[in-house]
Image: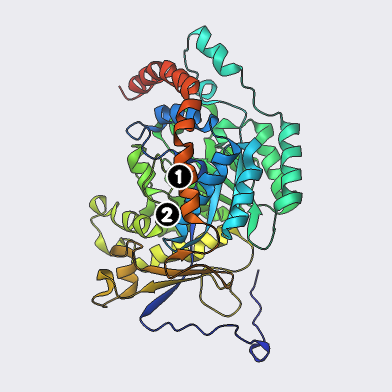
Amino acid sequence: MIPQPYDESSLQAEEAVDGEGMIVMPGMTNAHYHSYSNLLKGTENALPLELWSLYTVAYGHSLTEEDIELAVLLGAAEMIRSGVTGCIDHFPHLPKVDAALKAYEQSKMHVSVAPMLHDIPDHRFLQLDLPPHLMEKLETSQPKTIEEMKEFYIHLVYDWHEKKGRIRIMAGPNAPQRCSTEALKLCKELSERFDLQVHTHLLETKIQESYSRRFYKNGLVYELDQLGLLNDRLSVAHAVWLNSDEIDLLKDRGVFVIHNPASNMMLGSGRAPIHDYLEKGVPLALGTDASNCGTAHSLFETMRLGAMIHRSSQPDFETWATPYQMLEMVCGNGAKIIGGSPRGRIESGYDADLVFLNKTTTTWASDHHIPSQLVFHETGQSVDSVMIKGEWVMRNNQILSFDEYHVIQRAQHRSQKIAENSTSSLALADELKPHVKAFYNQFYK
């Protein structure tokens, strides 16, 4: 969409804002994120993805609609306070998606919710050798059929897509290897029928890369291309284990890659080849991923990690990612992935998504190079006020769109109940753990 210039003669400001002593920057977009995890901080965070997944799924099954509402608002508060005005929520709990969307409506953030489609569980894709009683427990929960998933998405699009100019729906395959060909074709159909963006995990771990090459003749990236999903509507999170030809193919098709440096490190998944992506011109954005496999939902921190993590393995310092590139990832590119009205710049014709940073903090005691200081020194402590679509959602460090303190109180009250509700699902995860651990150890032997 090309933004149309406003007729400035017809505009009249409702309020004049005194920006003396402030830095004003565009609102940022967290381009890969899982809201439900905001209630899971402090849970398993010393396991690789294949083992960690057992526990995040177990906790996730215990969450009620009230828990989902609270999780969304907790994450919204954390992001708004860090200057994030939009996010992509890759959302696994389809029956509770309306609770999440109602909470986002309350937060007034921009959001693209990508409900996760999948019909191949990991234990099947990885061909795990499990005892019959565990297989029986895992097979009791059947995923939605293709027709059920289609009906679910159609109703969701009609009810929520483009609502109030802030909420969008994406097709959200969990990960291609967790989807049958029919499920992936459904994503393509939905994307074309409703002009939806598509968002998925892609080759996050070495195990996923190895097994995908066994399962798909030419690899997973080429399989997606054959199905018509590699195009400028697609954004892929992680993309750690791609070869040079696959990166070229993403570039040729206009696919966006979302780098998640914190979760890649915490889960030991590997370092995404960001130098190659930048060199080849693949558009990049940044994500914080889940609270229980990442750190804070602060894109200041994520920019810092993303800018530094590859330096030790890249002696050609003239190719290191620059502060300008990192800021473009979180402002311009993240907004492009979400779609909708233009965002991510302070220009005529763009949404007034603005972040006001107070310069009376230690970060800004000196003022040498604003982009560098935003990336390498700002923590979010300077964020004073945030505006989304011209409306204040935080002012003078107080969130206005909802009662943050009340949300925190309610979440604290629910904490013990969540632990109790997780007992049986965590017991199953504990039973599965030694078998998945043996598989993992054998793979890396």
- The kind of secondary structure element at disc 2 is helix
Q: Are marks 1 and 2 in contact (CB under 8 Å)?
A: yes
Q: Which mark is residue 186?
A: none
Residue 154 position in % (x across, y down): 75, 44
- Image position of 191 (left or right of 399): right
Q: Residue at 28% of width from left, 64% of height from top?
A: 377
Label 1 CA crowd tier, 10 Å (few <14, some 14–19, many 20+): many
Q: Is residue 259 above or below residue 359?
A: above
Q: Amino acid at mark 1?
A: Ala
Label 1 vs label 2, nearer the camera:
1
Q: Residue at 63% of width from left, 49% of height from top?
A: 101
Residue 327 position in % (x across, y down): 41, 66
Q: Is residue 339 above or below residue 214?
A: below
Quadrant in the rendering for residue 22: bottom left
70 or 275, which lies in front? 70
Q: Earlier in the sequence, mark 1 or mark 2?
A: 1
Cα gap from disc 1 to disc 2, whole angstroms: 10 Å
Q: Disc 2 designates what residue? A: 277
Residue 178 position in % (x across, y down): 56, 31
Residue 312 position in % (x across, y down): 23, 51
Q: Disc 1 designates what residue? A: 239
Q: Amino acid at mark 2?
A: Tyr
> Could one spot residue 91 in this view of the protein?
no
